Amino acid sequence: MALTGLGIYKHLPKTNCGDCNFPTCMAFAMQLAAKKVSLDQCPHVSDEGKAALAEASAPPMKLVKIGKNSHELLIGQETVLFRHQEKFHHPTGIAVKVKDDLAEEELTNRIEAINNLHFVRVGEEIGVDLIAVEHSSTSPQGYARVVKKVKEMSDLPLVLLSPDPKIAEAGLEVSAERRPLIYAATGKNWQQMASLAKKHSSPLALKGESLEELADLTQQIKKLGVDDLVLSVDGPRVADTLQDLTRIRRLTLSKTFRPLGYPTIAFVTGKDPFQQVGQAATYICKYGSIVVMEGTEPWKILPLLTIRQNIYTDPQVPNAVEAKLYEIGEVTSHSPVLVTTNFSLTYFTVEGEVENSKIPTYISVVETEGLGVLNAYAGDKWSAEKIGKTLEEQKIKERINHNSVIIPGLVAVFRAELEEDFGWKVLVGPEEAARIPSFLKNEWKVTS
Ligand code: SF4
């Protein structure tokens, strides 16, 4: 919970000297509570006051870094319960498991498959973030060998999965410079695990039987000087895990309950792969900081990356591309001209289908404040006049030797005005982007 002006005022000198450019300490406190000024603007706060205000104004949820340099994952430090209140800041890290008892060739294939779980969607590269190396049957040396191999074959940050401190230590000895997440300290091993985390400056996950036990563990381990912690949430049913993830987020943000003010990790369970994808999607929405998956099939991972991408966009910023003339492929003066809006998803869907058609095409993107075709029409953000003027501004007629333009089928109503007022021969394209390739192959040839 954010500090109130009154809460801050208690720690100020109360002399009303005005050196902070505010007439009274209370006025300064109110501005500080609104985060419009910083504490160092008052040169007279005592060390005790600074300490109290720093502790009270620290983010309610810790930011934890896993990995190093350009291959690091930041999780936590979320500030709101609901995305529409502001935005979610650090996207859920998606981890895929590798077991240490795989045969050599199988292990190599699995690591390569994980490395290949990268895609491009709406112009953004999305992919898996971590590899979780699970100890199952080999010795500490065998586990270290597998961790080393994973580290050498992949730049992704690591999670070392074993409740045995000896196994965790063996894994750390070959990967500590990559700052892996150690999983996990429990009520039985927390002192040894915390000592390993401290020695290697690695983040540490904690696993408890209840939230109460987790809260106790964080306090004990923090006293040992380890505070880069991740809470493992692992109920007997999906509903229990979801409930615990939600309770942690609420207690952290609504009550500033610092013993649970850390990011979380959750695992998919069961054998049914569809259920696993459903579980992971649930935890991405509420409120997993890391989700650990079992499989490497793209059909399992891509939907999760898509959900994550949608949840972690800023709802206050239009998801838009620049409104301009785009050339897809080796365009010539004979190339078709398609018109669309500047909503990212619309543009990249159209662009993808044009690429699929293998017909070089101009795409004229009209400024619609980041709205899709029908929303822009309903919201009066685009019109035949706006399209006509945009085509003139983009000087498309200087690049083509025909007079045809293709508009989306959903706004066929623009056709007459574009023809009468701007002199275009208008082709009404398909309503669905998926039909663009067949439209360009069949209709465009006939008319051009
Ligand atoms: S500088 Fe500090 S002591 Fe002076 S009025 Fe501002 S808050 Fe109060």
Image (tube, rainbow, N blue to C red):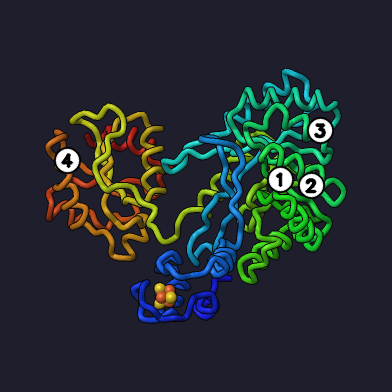
Front residue of 340 and 428:
340
Q: Which residue lies under the disc numbered 3?
A: 167
Mark 2 and mark 3: span between their CA atoms?
A: 13 Å
Q: Residue 204 carries which label?
A: 1
Tell whether 211 sits left or right of 430. right
* Residue drawn at x 43%, y 65% as measured from the top left: 38
**Would residue 170 be found to the left or right of residue 389 on screen?**
right
User: Is tag 4's residue or tag 1's residue first in the polypeptide sequence?
Assistant: 1
- In the picture of the structure, the residue carrying the numbered disc 4 is 396
Quick one: label 2 or label 1, which is nearer the N terminus? 2
Mark 3, secondary structure of its residue: helix
Residue tagged 2: 185
Q: Single out the mark in the foreground, 4 or 3.
A: 3
Residue type at tag 4 = Ile
Q: Quadrant of the N terminus?
A: bottom right
Counting from the top left corner in percent of width and height, residue 20 is at 37, 72
Query: Disc 2 on helix, strand or loop?
Result: strand
Q: Residue at x 55, y 62 (%)?
A: 79
Of the two numbered discs 3 and 1 on the same chain, state the one appearing first in sequence. 3
Residue type, numbered disc 2: Ala
- Left or right of 187: which side holds 430? left
Q: Is mark 1 within 8 Å of ligand 1?
A: no
Taking the spot 17% from the left edge, 44% from the top edge, the residue there is: 394
Q: Which of 342 and 286 is in front in this view?
A: 286
- Label 2 CA crowd tier, 10 Å (few <14, some 14–19, many 20+): many
C-alpha span from label 3 to label 1 = 14 Å
Residue toward you, 195 or 179: 195
* Residue 26 placement: quadrant: bottom left
Do the residues under discs 4 and 3 have CB atoms within 8 angstroms? no
Indicate the quadrant containing the C terminus: top left, top right, bottom left or bottom right: top left
